[in-house]
Amino acid sequence: MKIRIKDIRHEGLDVHGQIPAQTVGFTPEDSVYFIRPLDVQAQVQRAENTVLVKTHATGILASSCGRCLERVEQVWSQDFLLAFPIDRQTESIELDENIRQEAILHLPQRVLCKMDCKGICLGCGAGLNHEPCRCKSA
Ligand SMILES: [Zn+2]
Ligand SMILES: [Zn+2]
């Protein structure tokens, strides 16, 4: 998402855009990745030597449950404030890289498919949400 400095009016500028999931840089091989483009709403304000961008980003994040390893999809959304130093020569600012970094910082640390996920038995490998532990009968 590119913002041209001269488009920023005194009262600010509202921008809406998308950032491709590949730009954020996760793939299905990673433990978490975005399955759709990030949807980004930005309120842009210009101060003398700075452009401030209030950003609201939303995406769908796929990962594995930390206990049972089943695939989990969840809505991810985050607000952050970006500041870009500018001078007279600056014609535009590019948001993608900053949003990418913020997204990486704000990924969930541990995802569960549900709060009371029973996980996998370490003894028999049974997925305890769906089947009973077989350790005793074995
Ligand atoms: Zn689970
Ligand atoms: Zn077991």
Image: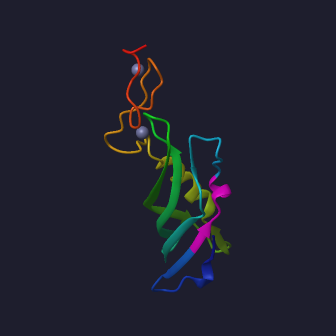
Is residue 101 left or right of 129 when viewed as pictured?
A: right
x, y percentage for residue 97?
62, 57
| Residue occupying image coordinates x 68% and y 73% | 89
x, y percentage for residue 121?
42, 24
Quadrant assignment for the C terminus: top left
83 falls in the magenta region: no
x, y percentage for residue 7?
60, 84
Is residue 10 left or right of 133 when viewed as pictured?
A: right
Q: Quarter-wise, where is residue 90 in the image?
A: bottom right
x, y percentage for residue 53?
49, 69
Residue 24, can we see it? Answer: yes
Which is more toward the observer, 114 or 20?
Answer: 114
Looking at the picture, the colour scheme in use is rainbow
Q: Quarter-wise, where is residue 21 in the image?
A: bottom right
Quadrant of the rendered image holding ligand 2? top left
| Residue occupying image coordinates x 37% and y 28% | 132
- Give the vertical position of 65 relative to 136 (above or below): below
Q: Quarter-wise, where is residue 81 in the image?
A: bottom left
Quadrant assignment for the N terminus: bottom right
Span of residues in magenta:
17-24
19 falls in the magenta region: yes
